[in-house]
Image: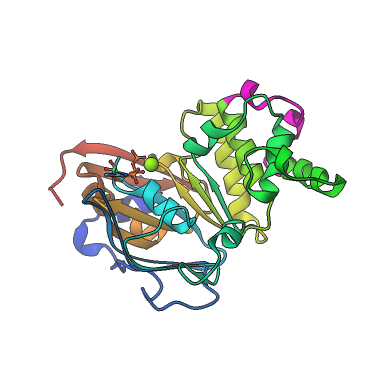
Amino acid sequence: MTAETVRQRSGRARDRPVRRSVGGGGRSSDADVLTLAGVRLIRDATTILDGIDWRVRPGERWVMLGPNGSGKTSLCQIISFYLHPSAGSVSVLGGQLGRVDVRALRLRIGLTSPALAAMMQPRLTAEQIVVAGKHAALAHWWHTYDETDWMQARRSLERVGCLDHAGQRFGTLSSGERQRVLLARALMRDVGLLVLDEPTAGLDLTGREQLIQTLAGLARDQTAPALVVVTHHVDEIPPGFTHALLLASGRIAAAGPIDQVLTSNRLSACFGLALEVEHRHGRWRAWATGVADPL
Ligand SMILES: Nc1ncnc2c1ncn2[C@@H]1O[C@H](COP(=O)(O)OP(=O)(O)OP(=O)(O)O)[C@@H](O)[C@H]1O
Ligand SMILES: [Mg+2]
């Protein structure tokens, strides 16, 4: 058992306090990547998100965890300006929702999700999919691209270790290769925020580990944008990730520095299952030990 495991097994009372909102909650600064204050989302009379105060600063690498239906995808869509909250304020990269042209600001936010992957044209090559990312377009024929753009697309593919597949049709790529191509697509623009909703969904062990290494490389890269990655599994958290947000029933259960949030007690409360958490060699692991106290 590692010292970290011992610390994490040592009971609720010893957990260091974690602010429910991070970095001073609603007080935003122009330098913040994103600031959410009092965000609520109601759809068809159902409250999907409520009381969301969250702040992300440049260089931070966040992982978002929570049970099915806890609101992770909805929150990703709000911070990518694809969903308008019912209440609260949302500022991303210095632009406040309601006061800026969201179409322009969306170009500074990279988003990948299983829904987006399904929207790609299978007959386009990886390179064509990536170059279209310059305009956040689904296909390359809507815009004109010069040689610099195609070079940038190849550099972006190289950055995610997929240059060898540049000329291959998207529909023939493996799931893992597709995820990496979509990541390259998001990196085609000068994004200040990269939001990856379940990038490892459906990947085999090799594909998953390759993608985790790619994300770990981005986490280390000082020039890379701030990252928000949604996953269902703590063992998929790439080394180097700095912060974690736990969502439960549409509310933030905990958010802050990763080693303060990913404790056995907090994760157990979030998932309603008694869990133990271990952090070893830069990777996280969690396993069930019984049924947890209800939230
Ligand atoms: N238009 C809508 N009307 C009613 N409920 C909705 C609507 N859209 C989403 N929801 C509900 O909001 C909740 C949050 O959905 P969301 O997709 O954000 O969850 P999630 O945490 O991403 O889940 P998963 O882990 O399964 O991907 C779900 O219970 C979903 O059924
Ligand atoms: Mg989801």
Q: Which residue is more in the foreground, 285 or 102?
A: 102
The residues colored magenta run: 159-174
From this view, report whether residue 37 is shown above or below residue 202. Answer: below
**Where in the image, quadrant-wise, is ligand 1 located?**
top left
Number of numbered labels in the structure image:
0
Instruction: Judge whether residue 213 is colored magenta.
Output: no
Residue 263 can be seen in this image: no
Colour theme: rainbow
Horizontal and vertical percent position of residue 94: 54, 72
What's the residue at 48%, 57% (across, down)?
81
Q: Residue furthest left?
A: 293
Which quadrant: the N terminus? top left
Horizontal relation, residue 265 to residue 208: left or right: left
What's the residue at 13%, 48% (across, down)?
294
Horizontal and vertical percent position of residue 38: 31, 68
Horizontal and vertical percent position of residue 122: 62, 25
Horizontal relation, residue 133 to residue 67: left or right: right
Residue 73 can be seen in this image: yes
Q: Quadrant of residue 163?
A: top right
Instruction: Judge whether residue 169 is colored magenta.
Output: yes
What's the residue at 56%, 65% (across, down)?
101
Horizontal relation, residue 156 to residue 2: left or right: right
Horizontal relation, residue 212 to residue 141: left or right: left
Horizontal and vertical percent position of residue 232: 38, 40
